[in-house]
Image (cartoon, helix red, strand yellow):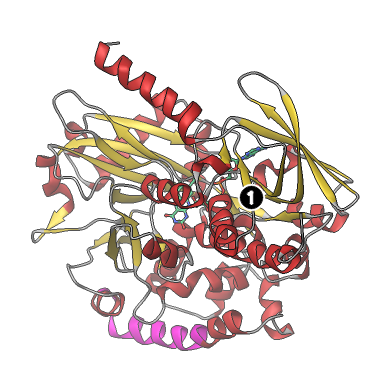
Amino acid sequence: MNPKSLVQSLFILLFFSSTAFANLPRQTDVLIIGAGLSGLATAYHLKKAGIPYHIVEITPIIGGRVRTVDYERKDQVTLHADSGMEEYWESNPAVKILKELKLPLKIEGSASSIILSEKLEVLSENENLEGFLKRIFSAQELSAFELFRSKVSPLIDRIQGESPLPPDLMTLKDIAFSEWVQQQKLPKRVSEWIRISVECEIGTQWEQISALDGISEFHIFLGKGEVSFRVIGGNKKFTQALSKFINPKQITLNERVTRVESKNGRVYVSVLNQVTHENRIIEAKAVVSTIPLYRLSELQFSPPLSEKKWEAIKTQTWGSYFKAHVFVPRTAHHFYTQKKSDILPLLSDSDLGVIYEGNPDQKTDTQILSLLVTGYHAEKFTMMPLDEVKKQIMAAFEQLWPGFSKEVQGMEFYRYHPRAIAGWPVGRSRFDALSDEIRTPENQIYLAGDFTEGTHSSGAFQSAARVARQLISRLKGVKK
Ligand SMILES: Cc1cc2nc3c(=O)[nH]c(=O)nc-3n(C[C@H](O)[C@H](O)[C@H](O)COP(=O)(O)OP(=O)(O)OC[C@H]3O[C@@H](n4cnc5c(N)ncnc54)[C@H](O)[C@@H]3O)c2cc1C
């Protein structure tokens, strides 16, 4: 290590170990488990409400599934790309907070270029969803799609507006989304467009989710479609800004919550330091767990969570995501440019997943393509040796853009738990009574996290707003 890097590393170590983040307190009002978006957003709302809190995070870094990687390359400016989440749809409550925190944002439309029936359909510059579909569909396909849309739009309005959902809507949870779309007798290309658009979001096949949840996910593609927001410089900027707002002194890193005991109206939380293996206990008035669905079983609850809650947790389903960063020289741009405009993001419906520009705000000699591989492609890659993954990605690129693989300078891969994306199978729904059970606090324990209300970061932000409301109504005015 050269002296400059050594000084930098020492500075970072000192900054993160002593200055920025805090030691564990003995007591707090609300102990939040996890410093991902759900935990940080919960603290954001509690700070605004004047309720004391402390966050405990198992890893040495905040962000959870939000991760931005900085690549140092010889003689180049540092490149950055998100190895976790990418974008926020317009209806995501995150957008309001992004704007409040004044983060620089890049706005994109809801339509993307797509490989449809083996043909590349390119979204033109400044073209919105309506214009795009009008161009790629025949007159007959378009009128069938319009009919479908006129049927789905009122359903979405009702799903978003009525609570609890009436029986006629709830029956939609008992049929697969694929089957429900097939019942609408749409032309093949129209139903394929719906399948590919939704499967990228849910990270699994459309047969695996209920019609009720498929319709709920589909809302971003209706009307003119929702725009999406990306944080310029990477999503890490967002989690850093949230941490600054809530005060890093209220976050302790490298601490794993192992056990939550509720007794006499208080909660006692066992926390294991990941470096020293010291186990301490923090006393709190309430605990918010934002541990993701696929890890929740690692936590002990005393007394145990109700059987209904466990039933709700155990009967949810999942989708898979896998990320690859592909390094190419900027001169390779012609492969993904048409008529001088960029064709990315591209829904490839293949091993390449959704192809994004990884570092769109950098004009460097090297460009990163960020592949968000989804569904069974992602599950397959998660289990496969990475050299094999690389071969398969190269082969898929060659099929899409012959000659492109020669341009690839390198790849980096990011694996997630094969169940990292929450979902509801046929027979279950985010709107059913079991999901209400998850959202009901028990023994001063509040479950938050993307899986408690949705599937993505919108679910994370909705859950944070909900637990904050529940806590404010319980704790406001209560003396320590
Ligand atoms: C590759 C990828 C791409 C994605 N792209 C998008 C996208 O474009 N748009 C979108 O909206 N969503 C996207 N998502 C989903 C989005 O990232 C998640 O929904 C969101 O980040 C979840 O936030 P969370 O806080 O609920 O969970 P997490 O981010 O998982 O945070 C939970 C935190 O709890 C910590 N923790 C776990 N156990 C313990 C313990 N015992 N003690 C202490 N701490 C603990 C974890 O380390 C973690 O930091 C993507 C996800 C992935 C994996």
Q: Main secondary structure of the magenta part?
A: helix
Quarter placement of the N terminus: top left
**Residue 258 locus on image (x, y percent):** 74, 34
**Residue 241 locus on image (x, y percent):** 41, 50
According to the picture, the residue beneath numbered tag 1 turns out to be 53
Q: Which of 88 and 475 is in front in this view?
A: 475
- The reply, left or right, for residue 291 in relation to residue 140 is right
- The reply, left or right, for residue 429 in relation to residue 391 is right
Q: Does the residue labelled 1 lie within 8 Å of ligand 1?
A: no
Q: Count the marks: how many?
A: 1
Give yes or no for residue 294 being in the magenta stretch: no
Which amino acid is tagged 1?
Tyr
Q: Height in image: 239 above or below 141? A: above
Task: Report whether residue 211 is seen.
Answer: yes
**Residue at point 28%, 52% (across, down):** 232
Q: Nearer the viewer, residue 355 or 440?
A: 440
- At label 1, counting other C-alpha atoms closer than 10 Å, the crowd grade (few under 14, some 14-19, many 20 or more) is many
**Residue 474 locus on image (x, y percent):** 75, 65
The residues colored magenta run: 136-153
Q: Nearer the viewer, residue 451 or 448?
A: 448
**Residue at point 71%, 22% (across, down):** 278
- The reply, left or right, for residue 51 in relation to residue 408 is right
Give yes or no for residue 144 being in the magenta stretch: yes
Q: Height in image: 258 above or below 353? A: above
**Residue at point 38%, 82% (across, down):** 223
Q: Quick one: SS at disc 1?
A: strand
**Residue 227 locus on image (x, y percent):** 34, 70
**Residue at point 25%, 47% (across, down):** 400
On the image, which quarter does residue 406 sit in? top left
Task: Report whether residue 315 is seen.
Answer: no
Q: Nearer the viewer, residue 231 or 227?
A: 231
Quarter placement of the C terminus: bottom right
